Amino acid sequence: MPGIKTLSGRDSDMAGAVAPGHIARDPRVVLSVEHLSFAYGAVPVLDDINLEIANGEFIAVLGPSGCGKTSLLRLLAGLEKPVSGRIVHDGRVIAGPDASRGVVFQDYSLFPWLNLRDNLSIAINKTRKGISGSERRRIAEEYLDLVGLPGVGAKHPYEVSGGMRQRAAIARSLALGSPVLLMDEPFGALDPVNRVRLQDLLMQLCHAGTARRTVVFVTHDVEEALFMGDRVIVLGTNPGRIISELQVPSEGKHNRHDYFKSKGFIELEGLIAALYHEDVERQLEAASVVTGEGASI
Amino acid sequence: MRTKNGHPAAHKTGLKGFEGILFIVAIGLCWQVTTSMIPLNNPKLYPSPALTFHALVESLPELLKGTWSSFLILIPGYLLAVVLGAVWGIVVGTVKWLHRAFDPFAKVVAPIPPTVYIPYAIALMPTFRISAIMVVFIGAFWPVFVNTVAGASAVPLHYRDNAGILGFGRIEYMRRVVFPATLPDIFSGMAVGLALSFILLTVAELFGANDGLGKFVQYYADYADYPRMVAGILYTGAVTFSAMALLDLLKRRVLFWVR
């Protein structure tokens, strides 16, 4: 199957396809996750995650609820500390959150007491020191224009729709100038129409042209992952681990309707379904082994 | 039964929303009826509404002067308590080791009824006004502080996450995130603190003031001028109510974003 690479069949010309655990030598690699494990107390969440992300790559992290995909994103952001392993960003081990990795959460990226303009303005204040308040507000309005929110800067988050809030949250991370954008199911709470609109907007802002942004996009929606991602990281559950990495061909994505009917898309969708089926079977088997042992004691 | 525009029994709901006013009117009527109907009533001890109103009008200049004198104690003491209680509460609620250090002390001292400080404050401070300001300050400080600490130590995780992503340092985090996020709690503490301030103010004035609302009531009670005394009580109630209403108005304005 062309364009499909699983862990067992890695291809060395693929971006970030260095054998797991190697320190990034590829100059294109901006983020490298090395033997990363994470737990909440005694509950293991992520187990030995190895991943390399190239500059300008759009990575979709796909997985069911509870597979630790949000934890992986929080670890990438520096909001959680790994139990073991490390994440290297531009040659430096991530020790905490900073503005070089912007995050868009599902529905709480903005401060409710600030209007949209001021929510952006505090981000601009961080990156462009010493500019006047009115200049900051002007730049904030420019970013709001960019995400399709002209003239609503004076509104507060509670006064606008969820879609508008997510647009503003995207604008904030663009205003922050973060080279890496981390998104945790950013469109998960939106209605289908707004979801499609925002997917298109994000593609247009991050994925088109020469200056591509590096994006890690967490979702549980297979369609979304395959449409948005250059590469899809498929996570399994109990504990969360990478069960496959799929390279997604970019052909045909300009027309969403045709793309979802294309042979490539249907094949990948089928493969993902098979992977999850396998993962569920493996877990059922593991569970029956445990109960079997329990009965024999 | 339905009225013309289809609303069921709309005429029945005509008094809806006015229950509070009606109750106050009923209390007033009761007052009038009891003072005029009870034959053994001593109008000096239990004055009628008319007599009290007359006393109120007559005493108004004195009451206004007393209000001013009371506010010179209440406002500095209360504002100092709000500012220090909120600032120190945000710091203690955010910095974990400070919380561990200060919390046991606060738990012991905060529940002491502030009225017990009054005699010592009067002995300690050079003037009555300063000692009363001190008592009001102590009384209002703890509710503001305790509420602020509770709010600041429970700032929702996602605000903290956003502050981290924006690269806020500790001071910026406290100023831009913890302070606004804690404002609802600060206002709860301010309301309790304000009510307590009025209690402490009037009690302190009973002890040693030459002027003020508490002093007014005490003075006319001593001279058995109960119409004036009752007028003083009602007037003090009105002032307290106005101050609380003003605080509530401020709260609504500041916390417009709370849903």
Image: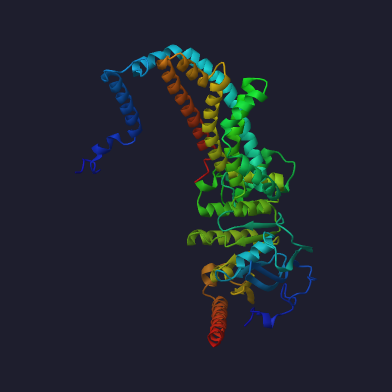
Q: Is residue B200 above or below residue A182?
A: above
Spot occupied by residue A234 in the image (x, y as percentages of width and height): 61, 74
> Does residue B3 appear to the left or right of A146 in the view shown?
left
In terms of depth relative to the viewer, which is nearer, A65 or B143? B143
Say if residue B133 shows up in the picture: no
Q: Quadrant of residue A254?
A: bottom right
> Does residue B238 appear to the left or right of A12 in the view shown?
left
Spot occupied by residue A177 in the image (x, y as percentages of width and height): 70, 53
> Does residue A27 appear to the left or right of B3 in the view shown?
right
In terms of depth relative to the viewer, which is nearer, B142 or B89? B142
Q: Quadrant of the N terminus of chain B?
A: top left
Q: Is residue A202 above or below residue B243?
A: below
Q: Is residue A258 above or below residue B90?
A: below
Q: How does the figure colour the protein chain or chains?
A: rainbow
Count of numbered marks: 0
In terms of depth relative to the viewer, which is nearer, B176 or B129? B129
- Residue lying at the far bottom in this picture: please name it: A296
Say if residue B147 shows up in the picture: yes
Q: Is residue B150 above or below residue B192?
A: below
- Residue lying at the far left in this picture: please name it: B1
Spot occupied by residue A76 in the image (x, y as percentages of width and height): 68, 63
Spot occupied by residue B139 in the image (x, y as percentages of width and height): 58, 33
Q: Quadrant of residue A97?
A: bottom right
